[in-house]
Image (cartoon, grey):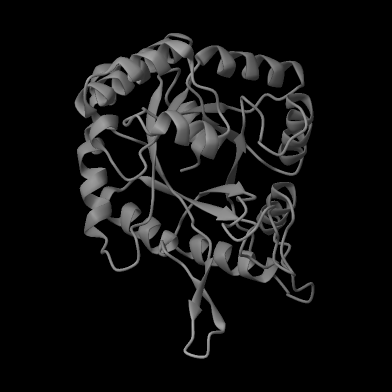
């Protein structure tokens, strides 16, 4: 079922969803099930599965030269989605990126997940890899998420890369895209960011999932700006509880988001790791309750592979 249909069928009730990471190469699917099982009592209608592109590693050879090696540290997005739908009978949503994909790769990826009965995709440009200063697309790949959305929409119309295909089947993907209440790190302004978000919608995006934020006012202001710009599709808030003091520096640096002073000082004053964890949980509970009171259709949690904190929040909220 499509995300938009889940929202429509909920009749105003706020739904619970979350995102998981594929396990590191060498781990099995049980680690995924162990992180999902504690959250199933809250009846998520869908679960997102991230996609992690290749990285480059350099190995020094005996002659002193460096050998460049391409590695994927977290493979398995498509297989995990299939396993989730089979085991839990809920919709799994694979992330699909511009980075690391040619247009042909993208088409084949979409064909595979269509064969598996997957109805939704989250289309993202993706970040630059560690060896890049700025994002660099594949030679025959997409530069922007708008282009990726357009290719998925074309497949929904039965338009494939090979124009000579006869009687080609249409896919029926519900396309999600990312939104940034504090603007994308590369966007010159929030208004320009929303302008390009509208382009993604014009090309076929049907719902938005936001980057994490820790101040609900920024989300509400963002939604208001989007609505004034003519964006009417659902805007699903993305939430993450802080869990360590290190994240006070890591989260703003990695995700380019601000942390409220009250949250920062509560973490700073926490006496130990358990106290920090509790601060993060309680802050996210308060965020969640305010969003539900405002009638937000879905609350989406970034679990980062750990479900304990998310479960405590869900118990208090759903």
* Left or right of residue 210, residue 168 in this image: right
Rendered location of residue 141, percent (x, y)? 71, 64
Total label count? 0
Residue 103, by quadrant, is: bottom right
Residue sitting at x 59%, y 52%: 172
Residue sitting at x 45%, y 15%: 291
Residue 268, by quadrant, is: top left
- Whether residue 300 can be seen here: no
* Left or right of residue 62, residue 84 in this image: left
Quadrant location, the C terminus: top left
Rendered location of residue 316, percent (x, y)? 25, 17
Rendered location of residue 258, percent (x, y)? 54, 23
Above or below 269: residue 207: below
Q: Residue furthest bottom?
A: 63
Residue sitting at x 21%, y 43%: 37
Above or below 240: residue 295: above
- Whether residue 145 can be seen here: yes
Residue nearest the observer in this picture, 246 or 30:
246
Residue sitting at x 46%, y 43%: 1
Residue nearest the observer in this picture, 71 or 10:
71
Q: Residue furthest front?
A: 64
Residue nearest the observer in this picture, 185 or 76:
185
* Left or right of residue 281, residue 139 in this image: right
Above or below 88: residue 201: above
Above or below 57: residue 44: above
Rendered location of residue 73, percent (x, y)? 42, 64
């Amino acid at each position: 079922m499509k995300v938009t249909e889940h929202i429509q069928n909920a009749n105003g009730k706020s739904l619970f969803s979350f995102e998981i990471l594929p396990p590191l190469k060498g781990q099995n699917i049980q680690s995924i099930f162990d992180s999902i099982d504690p959250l199933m009592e809250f009846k998520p209608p869908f679960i997102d599965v991230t996609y992690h592109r290749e990285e480059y590693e350099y190995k020094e050879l005996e002659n002193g030269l460096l050998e460049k090696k391409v590695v994927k540290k977290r493979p398995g997005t498509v297989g995990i989605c299939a396993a989730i739908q089979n085991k839990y009978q809920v919709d799994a949503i694979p992330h699909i990126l511009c980075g690391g994909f040619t247009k042909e790769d993208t088409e084949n990826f979409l064909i595979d997940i269509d064969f598996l009965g997957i109805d939704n995709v989250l289309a993202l440009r993706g970040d630059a890899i560690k060896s890049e200063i700025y994002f660099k697309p594949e030679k025959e790949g997409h530069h922007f998420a708008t282009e990726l959305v357009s290719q998925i929409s074309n497949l929904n119309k039965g338009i494939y890369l090979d124009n000579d295909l006869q009687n080609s089947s249409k896919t029926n993907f519900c396309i999600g895209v990312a939104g940034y209440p504090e603007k994308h790190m590369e966007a010159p302004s929030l208004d320009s960011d929303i302008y390009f978000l509208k382009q993604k919608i014009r090309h076929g995006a049907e719902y938005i999932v936001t980057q994490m934020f820790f101040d609900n006012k920024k989300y509400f202001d963002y939604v208001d700006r989007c609505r004034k710009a003519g964006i009417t599709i659902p805007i699903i808030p993305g939430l993450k509880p802080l869990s360590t003091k290190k994240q006070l520096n890591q989260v703003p640096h990695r995700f380019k988001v601000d942390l409220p002073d009250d949250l920062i000082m509560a973490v700073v004053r926490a006496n130990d790791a358990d106290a920090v964890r509790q601060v993060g949980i309680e802050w996210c509970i308060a965020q969640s309750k305010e969003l539900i009171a405002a009638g937000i259709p879905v609350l989406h949690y970034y679990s980062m592979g750990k479900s304990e904190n998310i479960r405590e929040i869900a118990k208090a909220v759903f």
